[in-house]
Amino acid sequence: MLNVALPKGRLGEKVYNLFEQAGYECPSIKENNRKLIFENPEKQIRYFWVKPSDVPIYVERGSADIGVAGKDILLEYSPEVYELLDLKMGKCSMAVAGKKDFIDDNRRPLIVATKFQKIAKQYYGMQDRQIDIVHLNGSIEIAPILNLADVIVDIVETGTTLKENDLKVIDKFLPISARLIANKSSYAFKRELIEKIKESLYQLTKEQL
């Protein structure tokens, strides 16, 4: 069995549909139930749903041979995996955002609210800008409004949430999309099958562009 970690949610459903189009279907995954693991013995493939940020952990530790994770997660946690393919799905950007009247005061450290600490440190490190990070896991947009932070570093898709909260994008600095990743040992031992799947997915992503 080839074990495939899929991210829960809309992106994971789109990714599964891509695998299905590539000929690696598992009909039980579309049944209305709460199961997390689905197998198709005929195709020798097993899918399981996990939290998006956990996909690289399952792949890195070998519980999954391959998986799909956002580039943001790969950059933030730097898992020991192979990145095989940009699936051109779940496209968005990493951005800095703040109040509409925000002006950076260089005389003191900039207070940055984010769950992407590593990415934020690298971004501001390249500018030699001193920052003070406030780590938040959700509702990051309200941090500047309540004066918890000067700006936020977060994923922006349409920008609607920012506009509705009177915030503006200050800089979009990193394009994000879903990536096919592989466990290093699995890639060595199951390379032929993994490469076959990768090539099928690549052809489909080309057609859909």
Image: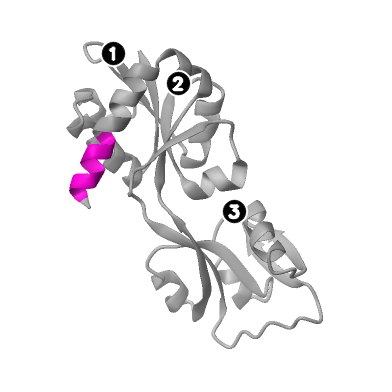
Counting residues from the start of the chain, the first of labels 3 and 1 encountered is 1
In the picture of the structure, the residue carrying the numbered disc 1 is 44
Mark 3 → mark 1, Cα distance in angstroms: 37 Å
SS at mark 2 in the image:
helix
What residue is rendered at 55% in x and 27% in y? 60
In the picture of the structure, the residue carrying the numbered disc 2 is 187
Q: Which mark is residue 110?
A: none
Magenta span of residues: 201-208
Q: Quadrant of residue 22?
A: top left
Determine crowd level at label 1: few under 14, some 14-19, many 20+ residues with C-alpha closer than 10 A.
few
Q: Residue furthest right?
A: 107
**Magenta residues, dominant SS class:** helix
Mark 2 → mark 3, Cα distance in angstroms: 33 Å
Counting residues from the start of the chain, the first of labels 2 and 3 encountered is 3
In the picture of the structure, the residue carrying the numbered disc 3 is 137
Q: Is residue 162 magenta?
A: no
Q: Position of residue 195 (x, y in %)?
A: 34, 25
In front: 161, or 65?
Answer: 65
Amino acid beneath label 1: Gln
Q: Position of residue 77 (x, y in %)?
A: 61, 42
